[in-house]
């Protein structure tokens, strides 16, 4: 039986620069389709920026027809206004994905770094170096927001292809034993 190929779109939301990355999955192998950024800093109106994010995500979905959509969840910062703006940027990207018929999966920055490098506290440079090896990319992009988005897509691929993917987490021994009666010694 032939392995069906998949395309995963990863987004690193931002109000000044939004990163995006697309990878092609064939069997257990991932390869780069595209990574880039949407530069928003020249637009002063925040609502115009949100519209541009929504439109770009829609365009990427129409152009590449991804089967998976993953986005980095905003981490908690001290500046409440910045967090609200970032949350809105994430929200319009998610809305575009839902509108495009995709299931949305969110990953924390720590989870993305852990999946790609094995270290949840890795810096952007370490993430980029691992992505270079994993996807065999020679040229470094101008913005690491693009590689962050690519890392989100790779993280999603790893989470989906994990042998533990799809297993429900048991809450307590009683539920575990109900889900796994073959484990009870008689």
Image (cartoon, grey):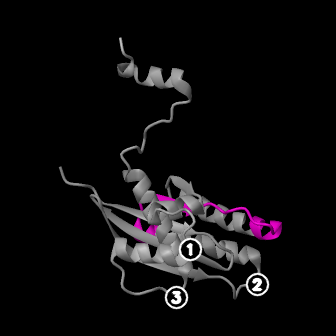
Residue 71: say if magenta. yes
Determine the residue positioned at 67% across, 80% down. 16
Q: Earlier in the sequence, mark 1 or mark 3?
A: 1
- Residue ID for mark 2: 44
Based on the displayed image, in which of its 4 quarters is residue 56 positioned?
bottom right
Which residue is at the front of the view, 175 or 68?
Answer: 175
- Of the two numbered discs 2 and 3 on the same chain, state the one appearing first in sequence: 2
Residue indicated by mark 1: 123
Quarter of the picture holding the C terminus: top left
Give the secondary structure at mark 2: loop
Q: From the image, state whether disc 1 or disc 3 is nearer to you.
A: 1
Q: Earlier in the sequence, mark 1 or mark 2?
A: 2
Residue 183: x and y in percent read: 37, 22
Q: Is residue 15 left or right of residue 98?
A: right
The answer to whether 24 appears left or right of 49 in the picture is: left
Residue 136, picture quadrant:
bottom left
Q: Is residue 59 visible?
A: no
- Residue 135, given in percent of the width and then of the height, sits at 35, 73
Looking at the rendering, the stretch of residues picked out in magenta corresponds to: 61-84
**Label 1, label 3: how far apart the Cα atoms are:** 16 Å
């Amino acid at each position: 039986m032939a392995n069906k190929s998949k395309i995963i779109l990863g987004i690193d939301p931002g109000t000044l620069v939004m990163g995006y990355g697309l990878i092609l999955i064939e069997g257990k192998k991932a390869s780069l389709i595209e990574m880039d950024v949407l530069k928003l800093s020249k637009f002063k109106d925040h609502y115009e920026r949100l519209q541009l994010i929504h439109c770009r995500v829609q365009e990427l979905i129409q152009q590449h027809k991804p089967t998976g959509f993953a986005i980095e969840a905003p981490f908690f910062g001290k500046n409440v206004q910045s967090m609200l703006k970032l949350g809105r940027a994430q929200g319009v990207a998610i809305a575009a994905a839902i509108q495009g018929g995709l299931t949305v999966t969110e990953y924390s920055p720590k989870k993305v770094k852990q999946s790609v490098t094995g270290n949840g506290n890795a810096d952007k440079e370490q993430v980029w170096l691992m992505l270079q090896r994993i996807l065999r990319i020679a040229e470094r992009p101008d913005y690491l927001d693009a590689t962050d988005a690519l890392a989100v897509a790779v993280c999603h691929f790893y989470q989906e292809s994990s042998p533990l993917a799809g297993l429900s987490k048991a809450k307590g021994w009683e539920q575990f034993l109900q889900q796994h009666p073959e484990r009870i010694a008689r």
